[in-house]
Image (cartoon, rainbow, N blue to C red):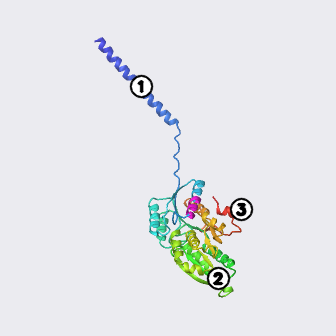
């Protein structure tokens, strides 16, 4: 019996010891937790959707680079997504609507249509998602329907192209303008600016300039522009000067002129200044280019959107810059910097 009693006592003693040990460990853990300062939760980065008109042209790659640079400087994340071609308005509407549903913190948009994208933008703004419009105008009012408009002075760019055409043709000539697309507000303004410059020249010297063609549209891609230009071959052969208002129409026209042995025989003024366009200018295949600053446009778009999210005051309209590039100034340090800002 003594042996049995001793065993019971020993077991109880061990159990009590284990209880104390566990309790002691518990106190030590609690004490350790109280004495530790928990790490603060890391703030979630702002997410900014950047939606270009398309994703194939080099121009939009420069916009993307500028947006990425701003995102890095400001510590935000970029969601870059757009239609493949610059004529897919429905797809762009859907992208805006999806980013709105995903509750993106802000949107930077280059609208394909100045009317069709208005309602999706208004819907995003109604849900407290600031929208900054870049590159091409949108119907509605800055500060109400969208936060700000960042763009080239497109009309002025067209005037610059027209004035240079007048200069290079010596004040008279027959003209062809290959338009871009009827729904594109930015190129419509460039076309109007060019025509205004020609009208001003005719006002000074009536009948100096005549139009062979100014009502054809290139389409959304370089290949479509080339095909349209090929279809205008008879007009091009008669022309003294040719003008195109964007990258794809300029490059499509250039290829058509090259394939028909017309380069160097026509004064050719284009728009935008991609590497391929500048190389053509240096080679004497294009006489002048009107260059935007898409890198700066992308940067300003994101910068403005972040400022709006933070409740800071932003300008309702911002000019991202435009310059005339010629064989005489293309290698100037200031122009090189403008053409290669990144």
> How far from the left and from the top, in percent, is residue 100?
46, 62
Task: Say whether marks 2 and 3 touch (CB < 8 Å).
Answer: no
**Vertical relation: 190 (above or below) 211:** above
The mark found on residue 310 in the picture is none
The region drawn magenta spans 58-66
Q: Quick one: label 2 or label 3, which is nearer the N terminus?
A: 2
**Residue 200's quadrant in the figure?**
bottom right
Quick one: label 1, few (<14), some, or many (20+) residues within 10 Å?
few
Characterize the magenta stretch by its predominant secondary structure: helix
Q: Could you say which is closer to the camera, residue 33 or residue 322? A: 322
The residue at the point 58 percent across, 73 percent down is: 257
**Vertical relation: 34 (above or below) 318:** above
**Vertical relation: 241 (above or below) 333:** below
Q: CA distance from mark 2 to mark 1?
A: 104 Å
Foreground mark, 1 or 3, reads 3
Q: Quick one: label 1 or label 3, which is nearer the N terminus?
A: 1
Quadrant of the frame with the C terminus: bottom right
């Amino acid at each position: 019996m003594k042996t049995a009693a001793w065993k019971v006592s020993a077991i109880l003693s061990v159990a009590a010891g284990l209880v104390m040990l566990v309790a002691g460990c518990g106190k030590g853990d609690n004490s350790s937790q109280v004495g530790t300062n928990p790490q603060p939760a890391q703030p979630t980065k702002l997410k900014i959707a950047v939606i270009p008109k398309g994703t194939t042209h080099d121009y939009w790659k420069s916009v993307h680079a500028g947006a990425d640079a701003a995102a890095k400087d400001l510590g935000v994340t970029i969601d870059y997504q757009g239609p493949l071609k610059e004529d897919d308005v429905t797809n762009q509407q859907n992208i805006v609507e999806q980013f709105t549903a995903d509750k993106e913190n802000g949107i930077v948009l280059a609208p394909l249509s100045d009317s069709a994208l208005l309602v999706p933008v208004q819907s995003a703004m109604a849900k407290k998602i600031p929208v900054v419009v870049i590159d091409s105008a949108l119907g509605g009012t800055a500060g109400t329907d969208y936060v700000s408009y960042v763009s080239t002075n497109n009309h002025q760019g067209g005037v610059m192209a027209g004035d240079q055409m007048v200069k290079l043709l010596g004040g008279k000539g027959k003209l062809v303008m290959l338009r871009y697309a009827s729904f594109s507000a930015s190129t419509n303004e460039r076309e109007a600016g060019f025509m205004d410059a020609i009208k001003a020249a005719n006002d000074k010297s009536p009948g100096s300039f005549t139009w062979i063609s100014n009502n054809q549209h290139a389409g959304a891609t370089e290949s479509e522009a080339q095909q349209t230009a090929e279809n205008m071959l008879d007009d091009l052969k008669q022309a003294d000067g040719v003008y195109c208002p964007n990258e794809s129409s300029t490059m499509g026209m250039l290829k058509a002129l090259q394939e028909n042995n017309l380069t160097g025989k026509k004064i050719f003024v284009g728009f935008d200044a991609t590497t391929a366009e500048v190389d053509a200018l240096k080679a004497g295949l294009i006489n002048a280019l009107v260059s935007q600053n898409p890198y700066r446009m992308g940067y300003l778009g994101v910068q403005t959107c972040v400022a709006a999210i933070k409740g800071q005051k932003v300008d309702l309209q911002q000019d991202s810059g435009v310059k005339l590039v010629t064989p005489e100034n293309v290698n100037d340090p200031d122009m090189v910097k403008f053409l290669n800002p990144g």
